[in-house]
Image (cartoon, rainbow, N blue to C red):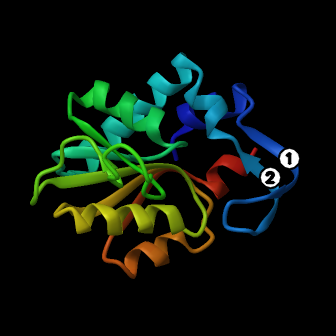
Amino acid sequence: MNSAVKESLRRCGALQYGDFVLASGRRSRYYIDIKKASTDPEVLSGIAKEMSSLLSTEGIEYDRIAGVVLGSIPLAVALSLETRRPFVMVRKAIKDYGTGRVVEGALAPGDKVLVVEDVVTSAGSAAEAVKALRAGGAVVETVLVVVDRQEGGTEALENVHVRLIALLTAKDLLEE
């Protein structure tokens, strides 16, 4: 468990209790508002340092970092600055103007891409990002998340041959 990230998420108010509807459509008694964390430079910097450390410890190799618009873009930028690796942004839908791309930024066939996410519940958006990146020729083997809610995301990503690693699990974050 990453106690530094846990404490910073609690301190900035990212962990909230109440009645919430998640992006997956599920209801929850708690919500993890990573946007509160990623808009605080101290917390965001700490998360990026811990992500970089975990990647090193796990021996994860990657050429680029990918963030899914909008929630994980600050995380991708912060990790890019921490590791000096370039990043790309993955849209959830193609825009009907501009370049019309799903993946924004330089991506070459064969690039090993690490996907970063804020919170994973069912891993739907992460799996879609993996699909879009692979369609562009990327090799995607790992999704790195700040918090894994432990509600099926790991299994969903295993189904597309991707490993989920997390700084914290919901169990870690919720224990006093």
- The percent position of residue 114, horizontal first and vertical second, equals 29, 52
Would you say residue 7 is visible in this rendering?
A: no
Which quarter of the figure has residue 129? bottom left
**SS type, badge 1:** strand
Left or right, 87 with reference to 129: left
In contact (CB < 8 Å): disc 2 and disc 1: yes
Task: Give the labeled residue for mark 2.
Answer: 30
Q: Amino acid at mark 2?
A: Tyr
Distance of mark 2 from mark 1, alpha carbons? 4 Å
Using the rendered view, name the quadrant where residue 162 is placed: bottom left
* Residue at left offset 80%, top offset 52%: 30
When asked about the image quadrant of residue 137, the answer is bottom left
The residue shown at (48%, 43%) is: 72
Position of residue 120 relative to residue 157, above or below, is above
Work out whether 37 lies above or below 42. Answer: below
Q: Nearer the viewer, residue 170 or 16?
A: 16
| Amino acid type shown at disc 1 | Tyr
The extreme right residue here reads 18
Q: Position of residue 126 (x, y in %)?
A: 45, 62
View extreme (front): residue: 97
The C terminus, quarter of image: top right
Residue behind mark 1: 17
